[in-house]
Amino acid sequence: MSRTLIWYRNDLRITDHEPLHCAVENNHEVIGVYCFDPRQFKNTLLAHPKTGSIRAQFIIESVNHLKKKLLELGCDLIIHDGKPEDFIPTVASTLNITNVAYHKVCGTEEKYIEWEVEKVLLKTGIKCKAYWGSTLINPADLPFPIKRLPDLFTDFRKKVEREFLIQNVFVAPKQLRGIKHTFIAASVSLDSLNLAAISNSPKSAIQFVGGELEAQGRLNQYIWQTQAIQTYKQTRNGLLGENYSSKLSPWLAIGCLSAKYIYHEIKKYEREQIKNDSTYWLVFELLWRDYFHFISMKYGRAIFELDGLQGKKLAWKEDATLFEAWRIGQTGYPFVDANMRELMLTGFMSNRGRQNVASFLTKNLGINWLWGAQWFESQLIDYDVSNNYGNWNYSAGVGNDGRSFRYFNIRKQALDYDAKGEYVRHWLPELKNIPGFKAHEPFKLNAQELDFYELNLGKDYPLPIVDLEDSVQQIKENQYK
């Protein structure tokens, strides 16, 4: 009898899981394994956890939910707190496994671990089978090889949309033939991972809970219950509230949902309800996500290098004081600070916010963009290696961008997207008394106004650490020569 071990990583689901589907179709006995790899929970070079508490808790919830679902189907998920290349061969040997199946990933560290696992297993005669399931489009279905992937997103999008091929979703199995075992599941918690305890922020518009059921529930709520998808293109740059965007990215990042599953649900909605610019735009965003995955496949380690995909040598600063002000939301610019405080408290930030704070770090402060990317990696609940580093390459001007110097005017962005100051007052309680757009520029208030609004500027809230206009001009002239 053939026995398949499913090695789970960023694919924590039952539905649209090809390795699981193939094992069932071939009548294999099945066991799942998930490893909390200690390398993913070490500190970065800046002494921040590589995986912070908020994302770690979300992963723990998702893994525990997956185990529960598999047990209901007749199969177990062995949870282990160690390196996959050490543990998986042990399980495979003990349980007489004939096949190990898993989904491929794009990250270079993750690929190295794949090779290490395969290297050990192949020596024992155990077959390894890798599948693709992390993007909307399978790389094999692209109209060009990865090495000829266009270096501009628009060129990529136009070509793939002319020959759009999205594979069907693999239906969730109704029953599994499990393998009996005596392995004891590790009891993994934030404490066991040496991470600080967390508490849900009452200011967050949505509480993210890990697991496939929660993911499908959020998708159903956004598309079918509220039908907020109908206005996505108009609301996607929002900052406050639950439904200005889909907020599916945390579940998508660790594979509680597949991009294909979301796509086919959108297509169903278009058939049964309405097809418009907004339904298309959500697919458009999935294509952006695909693009950065394919970029990381094309360029490999280059996305992690300071010079980026373009190999552009820029004179980056490494000023720890300025970086710390940015990191904790104390720059003196409320639009930047509110976004950074939201990130620290919730693990989430809007797309509009991410673009602005990245621009401020690189184009106003001139700080090493890798520092920003590592902080996002630590804090984002929806961290995805390809999208995080691909987007930071883009923001820093060393990646896939046709412009030589792209920056966001923080004052204009605040005026466009938070003209009444509601967002900054929500996340910056020290500015709660300042009305309207004045909340974005407390440094422009006179002594009488500061007294009236009960704000001690420089003590309750910092003065600006740089001048917006002067700093961007200096960075452009001195660093982006």
Image (cartoon, rainbow, N blue to C red):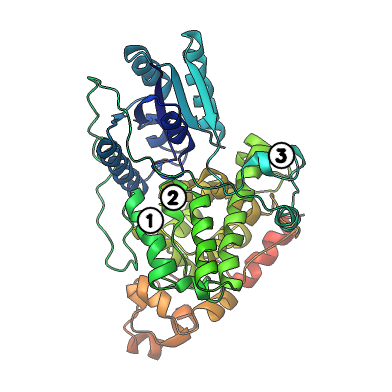
- Please tell me which of labels 2 and 3 falls first in the chain: 3
Left or right of residue 61: residue 97: right
In what quadrant of the picture does the C terminus appear?
A: bottom right
Q: Label 1, secondary structure: give it.
A: helix
Compared to residue 150, the image places residue 411 above or below, namely below
Q: Which residue is mark 1?
A: 216
Q: CA distance from mark 2 to mark 1?
A: 7 Å
Compared to residue 90, the image places residue 278 above or below, namely below
How busy is the neighbourhood of tag 1: few (under 14 within 10 Å), some, or many (20 plus)? Answer: some
Q: Label 3, secondary structure: give it.
A: helix
Query: Cβ–Cβ below 8 Å for labels 2 and 1?
Result: yes
How busy is the neighbourhood of tag 2: few (under 14 within 10 Å), some, or many (20 plus)? Answer: many
The dot on residue 146 is 3
Residue drawn at (35%, 59%) of the image: 217
Task: Please name the amino acid that badge 3 sits on.
Answer: Ile
Q: Which residue is mark 2?
A: 257
Q: Nearer the viewer, mark 2 or mark 3?
A: 2
Compared to residue 75, the image places residue 288 above or below, namely below
Left or right of residue 187: residue 409: right
